[in-house]
Image (tube, rainbow, N blue to C red):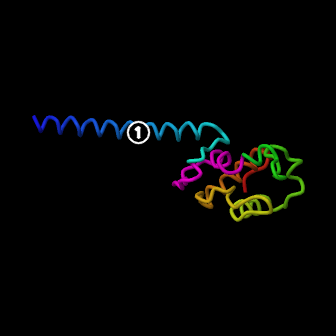
């Protein structure tokens, strides 16, 4: 009888742990599916974000300002807003995005993002603003 109770308890525990993991993964998927939306918990816990696409990284770190022009950020998709920027484009933008520039915090305030993920975000931003230009 004792053995049967132990087996039932272990199985119950494993099912419970599996459900919690699935729930957490579903929350992460839902947050990633909503451009520009990141939970406070997501900001607090660094995670491996090296898998992020440029678009996902953009919405996590850059979109909140570059979609609206907040704090003077040039609006993505508006070439006129970018007209007074450096002619070196991507290299300067990637450097500023990674290190910070004026009111823009380094990595959009998302310090857990790698340099390469931030570069992907800048590439996405430029591709949306200047779709006719080839990537560097």
Identity of the residue furthest to the left in this view: 1
Picture residue at 87% right of the left edge, 49% below the top: 81
Q: Measuring from the top left, give residue 105's x and y in whole percent.
A: 72, 60
- Residue 93 image point, x, y percent: 76, 59
Total number of numbered discs in the rendering: 1
Residue closest to the eye, 123 or 11: 11
Which quarter of the rendering shows the C terminus?
A: bottom right
In the image, residue 126 sits, relative to residue 37, either above or below, namely below
Magenta residue check for 49: yes
What are the residue bounds of the magenta stretch? 42-63
Give the quadrant of residue 30: top right
Query: What residue is at 21 percent from the left and 34 percent from the top?
Result: 8
Q: Is residue 11 left or right of residue 76?
A: left
Q: Residue at x 27, y 35 (%)?
A: 12
Q: Quadrant of the N terminus?
A: top left
Residue 119 placed where, x, y %? Answer: 67, 57
In this rendering, position of residue 103 left or right of residue 17: right
Task: Judge from the rendering whether residue 52 lies leftward or rightward of residue 107; answer left or right.
Answer: left
Residue 132 shown in magenta: no
Q: Residues within 10 Å of mark 1 (few under 14, many from 20)?
A: few
Q: Secondary structure at mark 1?
A: helix
The front one of 69 and 119 is 69
The foreground one among 46 and 127 is 46
User: Which residue is identified by label 1?
Assistant: 20
Residue 20 x %, y %: 40, 39
Task: Give me the residue at 73% from left, 46% from top.
Answer: 64
């Amino acid at each position: 009888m004792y053995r049967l109770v132990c087996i039932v308890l272990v199985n119950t525990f494993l099912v419970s742990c599996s459900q919690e993991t699935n729930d957490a993964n579903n929350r992460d998927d839902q947050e990633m599916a909503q451009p520009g939306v990141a939970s406070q918990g997501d900001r607090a816990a660094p995670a491996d974000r090296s898998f992020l696409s440029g678009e996902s990284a953009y919405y996590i770190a850059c979109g909140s300002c570059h979609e609206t022009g907040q704090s003077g950020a040039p609006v993505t998709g508006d070439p006129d807003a970018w007209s007074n920027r450096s002619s070196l484009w991507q290299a300067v933008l990637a450097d500023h995005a990674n290190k910070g520039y004026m009111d823009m915090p380094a990595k959009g305030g998302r310090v857990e993002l790698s340099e390469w993920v931030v570069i992907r975000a800048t590439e996405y931003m430029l591709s949306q603003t200047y779709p006719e230009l080839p990537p560097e």
